[in-house]
Amino acid sequence: MWDQIQADPILVAGAKSVLMQLNEAGFEAYLVGGCVRDTLLHKPIHDVDITTSALPAEVMSIFDHTIPTGLQHGTMTVVIDKNLFEVTTFRKESEYEHYRRPTEVAFIQHLEGDLERRDFTFNAMALDVGGKLHDPFDGQHDLKQRIVRCVGEADARFQEDALRMLRAIRFAACYDCQIDGPTWLALIHHRDKLQYIAMERVRTELEKVVEKSLLSLEHGLRLLVHSGLVSHTKASLSELVTDDQEVLSRVELISDIQAITEWDCALEHDAITRWALLFHRCGVRSEMADELMKRLKFANRTASDIVKLMQLIEWTEEIQHASNQKGVGVYSLWTQAIIDFGKVTASRLLHLLAVDQLFLRRLFNDTAMIGELREYGATWLAALETSQLSDLAIRGQDIVKHLKKTPGPWLGELLKQMLYRVAMGEIPNTRSAILDEVNRVIQENE
Ligand code: ATP
Ligand code: MG
């Protein structure tokens, strides 16, 4: 099975070396969890988790470079050739408090006990250095059948750690699985326990659903709505589903799987566009999205990028009217929008306009103006050389000197006005032309 691992050969060699060194020192050691699961699915792996009978202090003494990343849980990070390997001592988690992962764990000597504490059958498989797979709960079968099934009694497992309910949905969404009947019933029964889980951990699981692919986003959203989990988080996310039927009818309408997959590849890992799409498909507006992201403890920068994109989506609704007025063309509106929202946000909007054509139920109205934006938006965007103040051939202090005025809010407004005019091609981007225009505007206003 080792030769089927899809990863940088140096990472695989490093993982093998960690197992061998632990074995040579007299300990058991296995690859475990996501890397084993993903290899059986013929998918690339992104990190390697290792489980061992060695205690953290023993791990530390065997390897030259270790970092005590999660000592109280028995996790040491071993560094080999700049690659990081999380090495965790076999453990069981007997005491759980308030439906959360335990703070204290007991180290044990047997692999089986360690696999038993893991959440789902396909996450409870271990691979030894000789290529033998240890799969006591038949995770391989569930993986083939695409079934998410708790190890042991789902009822007990969700009460031990309520985050597992969200993880069940995450794995179902990301691996295109069904949730096993008893696991699903237990999830519905215990969904109110999700309130004990920190919002950061909720966000991490949601991120994986939203950011994996467009199909996982749709599937995850459907499961979140069906299960009602979104209404039971510590800070409620129920605004995501104001009208269940409405959202469900929206998410089940992807017309062309092949095209959607191509779009996914083109978008790569642009989380910002994916989150904006999620909110938009849920009928959430930018202010509410901002509020929901605060509850989910998003980083400020990420949240503000997502809000900006949502505002630009809302802008497309507003300008339908403006563009009907005489003399206001799509080109000039779009140029202003690029200046106001930035080139990156503008190109994200164009991505959304493109993907929207793949949904049976569109998010954008198919007006002439949207059509024009789809057709020429990217060309206009690429051709726009002056889109931010730093592109101007003049600085604020030059204008201050020229006018002999003290700087104030007027300066920013004036500069923006100059930027619009240069961008629209009304004046050239030279120092003298801009100063002439400044003089003209000042005179006009006096
Ligand atoms: P990913 O590919 O997203 O990293 P993963 O399966 O490796 O998926 P991790 O969160 O990295 O997920 O966890 C590693 C392993 O630890 C899991 O495969 C599972 O065996 C176990 N695990 C993680 N979280 C829990 C939990 N809340 N309850 C029980 N077992 C868990
Ligand atoms: Mg992992």
Image (cartoon, rainbow, N blue to C red):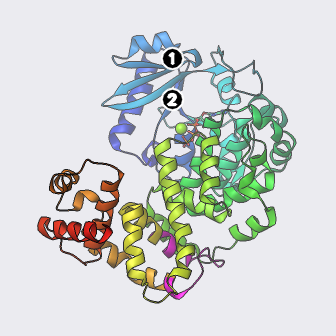
SS at badge 2: strand
Q: Is mark 2 within 8 Å of ligand 1?
A: no
**In the picture, residue 252 is in which quadrant?**
bottom right
Q: Is residue 236 above or below residue 268?
A: above
Q: Amino acid at mark 2?
A: Ile
Residue found at x 64% / y 73%: 254
Q: Is residue 323 above or below residue 393?
A: below
Residue found at x 76% / y 21%: 97
- Residue range highlighted in magenta: 351-369
Q: Give the x, y percent position of residue 421.
A: 28, 73
Q: Give the x, y percent position of residue 425.
A: 25, 78
Q: Is residue 125 above or below residue 249?
A: above
Given the current orientation, which residue lies at the most extreme left position?
Answer: 432
User: Could you say which disc has been placed on residue 27 in the image?
Assistant: 1
Q: Amino acid at mark 1?
A: Phe
Q: Nearer the viewer, mark 1 or mark 2?
A: 2
Given the current orientation, which residue lies at the most extreme front position?
Answer: 446
